[in-house]
Image: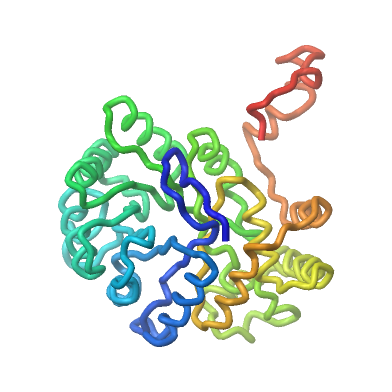
Amino acid sequence: MRYKLLGKSGLRVSELALGTMTFGEDWGFGASRDECKKQLESYVEHGGNFIDSAINYTNGSSEKLVGELIASDRDGFVLATKYSLSTRPKDPNGGGNQRKNMVRSVETSLKRLGTDHIDLYWVHLHDPLTPIEETMRGLDDLVRAGKVLYVGISDAPAWVVARANTLAELRGWSAFIGLQVRWSLLDREVERELVPMAQALDLGITPWGVLGAGLLTGKYVGGKAEDTRRAGWTAGRMTDKNNAIVAELVKVATEVERSPSQVAIAWVRQKSPVVIPIIGARKHEQLLDNLKAADLTLTPEHMQRLDATSAIELGFPHDFLASDSIRSIAYGGTYSLIDDHHRR
């Protein structure tokens, strides 16, 4: 693997991140310690150094396993974890982005991970009950205390992220360098606001769900919802449009002699130079297959076919502003004559 700078920082991360939501068997579908060890070893052998966890993954087993498995070379990894989700269901302060949960969470994660600092600390989701000023100042305090080196945000509206970073830059606080979002051939809504915002603010994008809850592996082609074992996640997504997307994905995969999973990961990687997909697996062989996406580059023709099949309407104001009539009003007849190096 090659390495990328994560957003507006000097932090070097591998071009594929290892997701560890499957580390631990507490939720009934994860991987054993031995299986996790094999996955991590293979990831490292391929040049990977970017590990993503969260305080709530497998009830805390994920962080514990990650900490144990990287203990012999802690400094060789960019270690990321998240807070926000409730770990104390009956406690109103047991979740959210306020200082109380933030401080308790970071101390819990540090202990589980067996380290004195977290390289990248993610806000797991937007909490409208907590002022963004409180969250950003609290995160900056953690950075100044040396417990956290960088901060990022996951699953939040674009306006929240933009406002947070504007406040941080204005007040001299640590700003978000990364954005974590659900993005795949089946989930392109982020291209309306979140992706353009991340590109404009120079945020590294670490997509999760790049295999569309398993549909983009191609193993459910021609099947029915009731045939799947993960009804809650996969079966409900087997719509006519999604099945058509998977069918085209399988065609492309056959043409390039790669697995559908590798093509799906390659597609999202090529959508923007700032993308670092999160890959995770329950089985070692699944991870090995996903890692091969690092050396796959799809042709413009293949990208166009996948884009066309999975296309969504951007809606207002995007389609409105991109229309010929509005561009004529705004720019006269000069729009096509202007070379815009900002345009991506």
Q: Is residue 307 left or right of residue 40?
A: right
Quarter of the rendering occupied by the C terminus: top right
Is 232 placed above or below 313 here? below
| Residue 37, percent from left and from top | 41, 81
The quadrant of the image that shows the N terminus is bottom right
**Residue 212: x %, y % from top left:** 59, 67
> 56 or 141: which is nearer to us?
141
Using the rendered view, name the quadrant where residue 165 is placed: top left
Q: Name the residue rendered at 71%, 15% in the picture.
A: 330
Q: How is the image coloured?
A: rainbow
Against 28, residue 65 (above or below) is above
Q: Position of residue 343 (x, y in %)?
A: 66, 30
**For this rendering, which residue is in front, 26 or 128?**
26
- Residue drawn at the location 18% of the way across and 48% of the way down: 99
Instruction: Judge from the rendering whether residue 217 lies leftward or rightward of residue 71; answer left or right.
Output: right
Total number of numbered labels?
0
Q: Quadrant of residue 223?
A: bottom right
- At 63% across and 27% down in the image, what residue appears? 342
Q: In the depicted view, which residue is nearer to us: 264 or 157?
A: 264
- Residue 116: horizontal and vertical position, in percent? 20, 59
Q: Is residue 184 rendered to the left or right of residue 303?
A: left
Q: Residue at x 19, y 61 (%)?
A: 94
